[in-house]
Image (cartoon, rainbow, N blue to C red):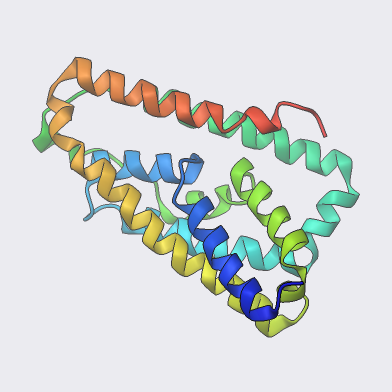
Amino acid sequence: MLTHTSLWVSLFLFCVATLFTPGPNNLMLMRVGLVGGFRKSWESILGVAFGFALFILSVGLGLGHMIQEQPQLAEVLRLGGIAYTLYLAWSIACTSAVPTQQLSQRRTTRFWPILVFQWVNPKGWMMALTTTSTYSPLMSHPVSLLCVALIFGATGLFSSLLWVGIGFSAQKAAAFPVAFRLFNWSMACFLCSSLLPLLKPV
């Protein structure tokens, strides 16, 4: 049986493995980095990091149990997450190539919409429910639950910076329509593939 120390280490590794891999948040952040660069991405970065930490905290305080006890509400969240993720994938796929100097003039996603999105993020729900079941000893006390949320928030902050950086590094490709379109469609396909576990109704 894992000691609490081992559980904390395991939780941190779980955070790294899930928060740094492709998903709706990360691909959205990559697009924000592409169209806005670091200077215009801080609202999006903080929206993801703070929003997901708050989401984990709310799940640990009972939201996750309530959702599991209400199949209709779970279905609404599932369908809402699928719909928004498909919209996001379409938005990424349809982003057209423009001169690099014009990218910074494009509008990026704001803090509050991204924060609210955490409650319908399909990957986020899978992560949160896995956390509450696997790391329940760490979620049972208010102080340790707060620490869990802070670990997700801090790890998410570094993950967000990385994915914005990936998008920013692709700005030079924005001047080449074929390469840029291929890049966008590849990211849109990755995003759609994250929905596969959700295609089965609750």
| x, y percent for residue 80 | 67, 35
Q: Quadrant of the N terminus?
A: bottom right
Rendered position, 115 above or below 90: below
Give the mark count.
0
Report whether residue 94 is seen.
Answer: no
- Looking at the picture, tell me which residue is in the foreground, 3 or 160: 3
- Classify residue 9 by image quadrant: bottom right
At a point 88% along the width and 47% down the height, the residue shown is 70
User: Is residue 8 depicted above or below 158 in this figure?
Assistant: below
Q: Nearer the viewer, residue 128 or 46?
A: 128
Say left or right for 85 vs 163.
right
Residue 79 rendering spot, x and y as whole percentages: 70, 32
Give the left or right position of residue 20, taking residue 137 as reference: left
Is 86 rendered above or below residue 141?
above
Q: Position of residue 188 (x, y in %)?
A: 43, 26
Image quarter (top left, top right, bottom left or bottom right) of the C terminus:
top right
